[in-house]
């Protein structure tokens, strides 16, 4: 049952990281509570809670992403292992002996091959050993299917060398087509990044020109609230949060007030509403654009979350940086 332990080891590693991340996030949030009480400023707590969320999520996603890269490397080296296995089998030895005699360089696949050889040398049946190896590679549909074919090849017998050669050729074609698809889609991913940066630039421009214009209109309206120009009544310009009529609006405006305190958007109701709204739009746009980019490039939600976090972080930095220099 050693291969099953190996498979569960990755899961236990994620669980350990999850526990450590939760403890670190909780400790950081507690620090924020202490600072907010000491300095009588609730913004400390909100900022520390935001950072705690990143502390909790990012390590686990990073671990999952590293595991995904390891699986991709295993897929790339598996045809080399099959080629060595075919050459060893061609020399006339039995299938288990052919596996034991494979001593090439297989990258991330090395530990799986060595584990398979170890199981066979400990007189574990080749059938069980291959099943364990398939279990440890089950996160890859390509490798899982290949191991199933390898297992059926051993069970059925026949011309094993030809089957291994055909399997290797099929895997190489799959890898080649996947590499071609990635290289083709990479330009689309770059275009999505470009569109996202254009979106951020538009949001910054709106914050720089629209909000001051609305504020000036509000001041003008306040001084001439009862007057009219050219027979037209001057409508007051105010924050939509000042006329909330339902629970959803109240919750959203409460969130905007919290965001304004966290990111120093000021106390002007128009600034609180529009700057918080624009930042939230950038965050949501970044996350979902990144997920789409990951699905396009590698058909993986983990890769999508990586792009999403990158875009969200860049959006945060650009918006908050523009706000810090007074351009937003």
Image (tube, rainbow, N blue to C red):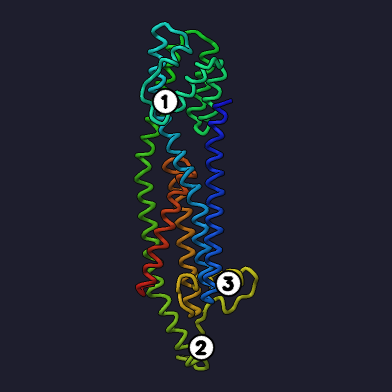
Q: Residues within 10 Å of mark 2 (few under 14, many from 20)?
A: few
- Residue 156 in the image, given as x and y percentages of width and height: 54, 11
Q: 196 left or right of 277?
A: left
Q: Nearer the viewer, residue 36 or 218?
A: 36
Residue 233 numbered mark, or none: 2
Query: Considering only order in the chain, which callout, 1 or 3, is on the residue closer to the N terminus?
Result: 1
Taking 245 as reference, is 109 above or below it? above
Q: What is the C-alpha distance between the residues marked 2 and 1?
A: 76 Å
Q: Residues within 10 Å of mark 1 (few under 14, many from 20)?
A: many
- Residue 23 in the image, given as x and y percentages of width and height: 56, 54
Query: Considering only order in the chain, which callout, 1 or 2, is on the residue closer to the N terminus?
Result: 1
Query: Pointers 3 and 1 in contact (CB under 8 A)?
Result: no
Residue visible at 42% across and 84% down in the picture: 216
Q: What is the C-alpha distance between the residues marked 2 and 3?
A: 31 Å
Label 3: which secondary element: helix
Residue 78 numbered mark, or none: 1
Number of marks present in the image shown: 3
Q: Nearer the viewer, residue 111 or 277?
A: 111
Query: Which image quadrant is residue 33 in?
Result: bottom right
**Residue for badge 3:** 254
Label 1: which secondary element: helix
Taking 241 as reference, is 319 above or below it? above
Taking 178 as reference, is 49 above or below it? below
Taking 134 as reference, is 22 above or below it? below
User: In which quadrant is the C terminus drawn?
Assistant: bottom left
Residue visible at 54% across and 27% down in the picture: 3
């Amino acid at each position: 049952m050693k291969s099953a332990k190996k498979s569960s080891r990755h899961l236990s590693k994620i669980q350990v990281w999850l526990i450590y991340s939760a403890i670190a996030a909780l400790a950081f949030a507690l620090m924020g509570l202490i600072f907010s009480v000491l300095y009588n400023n609730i913004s400390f707590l909100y900022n520390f809670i935001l950072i705690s969320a990143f502390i909790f999520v990012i390590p686990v996603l990073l671990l999952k992403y590293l595991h995904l890269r390891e699986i991709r490397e295993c897929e790339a080296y598996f045809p080399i292992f099959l080629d060595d296995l075919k050459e060893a089998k061609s020399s006339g030895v039995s299938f288990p002996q052919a596996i034991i005699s494979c001593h090439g360089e297989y990258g991330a696949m090395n530990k799986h091959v060595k584990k398979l050889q170890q199981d066979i040398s400990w007189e574990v049946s080749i059938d069980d050993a291959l099943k364990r190896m398939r279990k440890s590679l089950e996160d890859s549909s390509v490798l899982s299917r290949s191991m199933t074919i390898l297992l059926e090849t051993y069970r059925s017998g026949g011309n094993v060398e030809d089957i291994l050669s055909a399997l290797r050729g099929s895997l190489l074609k799959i890898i080649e087509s996947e590499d071609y698809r990635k290289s083709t889609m990479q330009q689309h991913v770059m275009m999505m990044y470009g569109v996202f940066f254009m979106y951020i630039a538009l949001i910054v421009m709106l914050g720089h020109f629209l909000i001051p214009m609305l504020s000036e209109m509000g001041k003008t309206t306040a001084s001439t609230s009862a007057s009219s120009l050219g027979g037209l009544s001057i409508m007051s310009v105010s924050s939509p949060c000042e006329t909330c009529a339902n629970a959803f609006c109240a919750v959203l405006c409460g969130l905007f007030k919290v965001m304004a305190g966290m990111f120093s958007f000021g106390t002007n109701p128009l600034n609180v509403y529009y700057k918080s709204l624009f930042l939230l739009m950038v965050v949501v746009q970044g996350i979902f654009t990144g997920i789409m980019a990951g699905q396009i490039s590698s058909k993986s939600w983990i890769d999508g979350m990586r792009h999403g976090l990158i875009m969200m972080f860049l959006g945060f930095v650009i918006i908050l940086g523009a706000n810090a220099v007074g351009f937003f």
